[in-house]
Amino acid sequence: MYRYDEFDHQLVAERVEQFRGQVARRVAGEITEDAFKPLRLMNGVYLQLHAYMLRVAIPYGTLSSKQMRMLAHLARKYDRGYGHFTTRQNIQYNWPALDRIPDLLQELASVEMHAIQTSGNCIRNVTSDQYAGAIADEVEDPRIISEIIRQWSTFHPEFSYLPRKFKIAVTGHKNDRAAIKLHDIGIVIVKNAAGEIGYEVHVGGGQGRTPFIAKKMSDFVPAAQLLAYLEAVMRVYNMLGRRDNSYKARIKILVHETGEEEMRRLVDAEFAKIDASQMLTVPQEEIDRIAAYFAPPVLQELPATSASLDSARASDSAFDHWVTTNVVSHVKSGYGIVNISLKPIGGIPGDASDAQMDVIADLAEAYAQDEVRVTHEQNLVLPHVKLDDLKTVYDTLLAHGLATPNLGMISDTIACPGLDYCNLANARSIPLAQEISNRFADLDRQYDIGELKIKISGCINACGHHHVGHIGILGVDKKGTEFYQISLGGSADENASLGDITGRAFTEDDIVDAIENLVASYVDLRHNGERFIDTYRRVGMQPFKERLYAE
Amino acid sequence: MQSNRQLIKDGAMAENLWSYVEDDAALSDAASIISLQRLEDDADTLRSRNAPLGVILRASEKQGEDVRRLAPFLDMIQLVAIEFPVYRNGRGFSSARILREELKFDGEVRAMGEVLFDQWQPMARCGINAFEVDASISLDQFNQALGEFSQAYQPASDGRRGILWQRHGK
């Protein structure tokens, strides 16, 4: 894991002091809420329906056990004993008091964390693959370049007041778990014919009220030139992005209105000018220094199978199910990648209590090389666990309500905070996720249905990623009543696609039955081995729609 | 410059010797800041004028004026004022860097409009060296804001190499 040096420490400490001054000026009434707003937003402090919310950055979703324990401590001391892991691999606290936030940030800084650029119209936390450094066939650990991007983008003097927020995601694997094509910039690490590392850069993806899949701007940006290329994209956006209408201000709209070809020409022209100065060519020594922090952990030489695991699986069918659904093959034989579902049946997606966070920190320290990852699907990962240790880890997780064997299943929903917290929402998301989870609680049924990603947004801003759900659900407000619109066929992976709306929206009372109806159609229509998304792509909307709206 | 404003230039209080001149007003021999359109339209006659000339880059509703339109006239002007219509509109940060780094303009680059406390330091990093700020701001406050961050990760127009480079003595 990356460790701060004196430079990193100093900047974060200075930021805490700066914010302390800003809060003091606000509390003393020297500045108005209006003037304070841009300042608090730069520090991840939102004003929600009932209280201030603080969003803490978890760069590329990687945490140490010490950091996880701090998150637990903060939940206890400054919040109501829980935190909420988000689709951007961050954590949110829903109830901190404004005047205590500087102290909270100071404690956070002691474990090399911050809330910098987790809101505001700036470059946000860089997100990445939760299996980085643990999965086979990775071109390069994406956290190396993600950390360089994190540093370059931190307090960037030119790009802190962009037309709108800006999100960058990186993957080093052909299977995209970071939804890079739904980001303002999505980066795929590739190797050219000469074996050199470079970056395929996609620009202009995004969700919100006008979703777009990103366009590929460059097939190969050489490693040394990536920052110059990113700065070129950012500058074209900052100069030409729309500022007259915040709904049209994201770079996806600029790319769409400018056209892919012209956008590429503009970026290339800017890139030529910026790169000529060589000012942004990162020294190889610095790349090596950062890469060293992400060197593969020293793991034991173990056989590919574990006798103790096999016998435990044979004698405990619940454990066996959990291994099947939640444990993924590790690059190193004898190890596995453990997914911890934060979607207990009937629970709130992404929430974890302080006690649960402590337990996960302990497990990471004892069994997972001291690392925890956060996934954009609002789950957690222990990246390097011996197969021999899986049963012990499972037993502990089970005892703390963390062993739900539903990864990728119908109850593993993404949901935004919705009307329970958010002042933008039209409808509640969390209670609906809970209802769906309860309706499909039976595990045998979930396994029969197989991979099915339901994503729920409480409004058109799409924080719950409904556009890319195999089944997407969007809360809409009609004459003061909550309605839910359904879309089918979305996907956030390397074959990214946007869902198609089925038609008329459903009431709160009907929506879960509608989901049931769609699942029943799928089960009738599927061919052997087809997932929901495969069946939908084969047969299209019509057969689903006919049954969904049949009288 | 508005009457409730004062000028801080190169880290010190400064007397404002410039005035903004509307397109339909005649130009005197005083130091004058004119519109980009007027500069382009009257470049030939302005070239023979014997008094300091400045230009303001206005921020329009949609995008704002393009700093690169100044390229043919840089030898005629001593000042570029960049308008920041609201604090959220950070387009001028890019305009300033392009002026300094690409167009190599070495005259005064002035920020005017709605500019907040915490924006002075990044503005300075982008090459802005003069600030029209509220008259209630003391020079101490200003300089404190300019020093809020002692280091920067990335290079910009202020000659710093950035932490990513400094770590290796570059």
Image (cartoon, grey):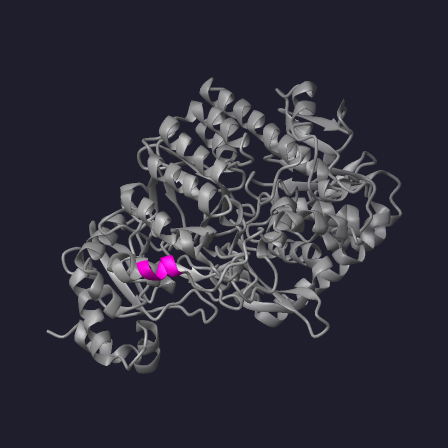
Considering only vertical position in the picture, is A185 above or below B111?
below
Q: Which percent across, then down, holds residue B109?
A: 75, 39
Looking at the rendered structure, the number of numbered marks drawn on it comes to 0
Q: Nearer the viewer, residue A99 or B23?
A: A99
**Is residue A238 in view from this perspective?**
no
Q: Nearer the viewer, residue B101 or A246?
A: B101
The quarter holding residue A258 reads: bottom right
Q: Which percent across, then down, holds residue A104?
A: 46, 28
Q: Nearer the viewer, residue B127 or A295?
A: A295
Of helix, strand and loop, which mostly describes the magenta segment? helix
The quarter holding residue A354 reads: top left
Is residue B102 shown left or right of residue A126?
A: right
Considering only vertical position in the picture, is B158 above or below A442?
above
Residue at the spot 31% in from the left edge and 41% down from the top edge: A421
**Is residue A300 in view from this perspective?**
yes
Residue at the spot 29% in from the left edge and 68% down from the top edge: A450
Q: Which percent across, then down, holds residue A302?
A: 51, 59
Q: Which percent across, then down, holds residue A513?
A: 15, 63
- Tell me, yes or no, whether the highlighted magenta stretch contains residue A309: yes
**Considering the image in quadrants, where does the N terminus of chain A appear?**
top right
Q: Which residues are magenta?
A: A307-311
Is residue A454 shown left or right of residue A335?
A: left
**Considering the image in quadrants, where does the C terminus of chain A appear?**
bottom left
- Tell me, yes or no, whether the highlighted magenta stretch contains residue A152: no
Residue at the spot 18% in from the left edge and 66% down from the top edge: A516
Considering only vertical position in the picture, is A543 above or below B30?
below
Residue at the spot 60% in from the left edge and 28% down from the top edge: A13
Is residue A174 shown left or right of residue A350?
A: right
Name of the residue lying farthest toward the left: A551
Q: Nearer the viewer, residue A40 or A170?
A: A170
